[in-house]
Image (cartoon, grey):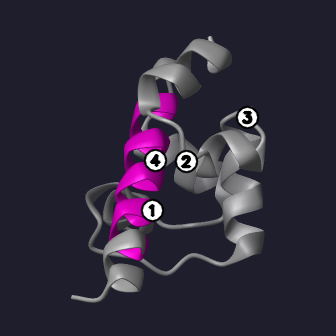
Amino acid sequence: MSDSDAGSAAGVQRVRERLRTIRQLRGLTQQQVADQCGLTRTAVTDLESGRRRDISLGQALVIASVLDVSLGRLLDPEPLDIVLARVE
């Protein structure tokens, strides 16, 4: 695995952790997020689990909006606990 691939995998891991954690903090189910984003619940499940790694910028913006966070917070490279302190 190249350094670029490792960095990309770490980035995907961060986004999926943030998506799941922020969704849960907001008290939203996967189905509610899916409905509000125009996605299927399976798509949200796959994003959170890492089975789906491709997401368009438009989809990321919609998800961030539904979760009531900026796109930057969703994609933030800082550790999750620091990001969550800013979300709460």
Say whether marks 2 and 4 touch (CB < 8 Å). Answer: no
For image coordinates 69% across by 68% down, the residue present is 59
Say whether marks 3 and 1 touch (CB < 8 Å). Answer: no
Q: Nearer the viewer, mark 4 or mark 1?
A: 1
Say whether marks 4 and 1 touch (CB < 8 Å). Answer: no
Which amino acid type is marked by label 4?
Answer: Gln
Give how far across and how far down residue 51 sits, in percent.
Answer: 27, 73
> As displayed, is residue 9 above or below residue 14?
below
Distance from disc 3 to disc 4, alpha carbons, whole Å, reads 18 Å
Say whether marks 1 and 2 touch (CB < 8 Å). Answer: yes
Q: Quadrant of residue 67?
A: top right
Crowding around mark 1 (Cα neighbors within 10 Å: few <14, some 14 to 19, many 20+) is some
Give how far across and how far down residue 2 sits, in percent.
Answer: 29, 89
Crowding around mark 4 (Cα neighbors within 10 Å: few <14, some 14 to 19, many 20+) is some
Distance from disc 4 to disc 1, alpha carbons, whole Å, reads 24 Å
Q: Is residue 27 magenta?
A: no
For image coordinates 44% across by 21% down, the residue present is 81
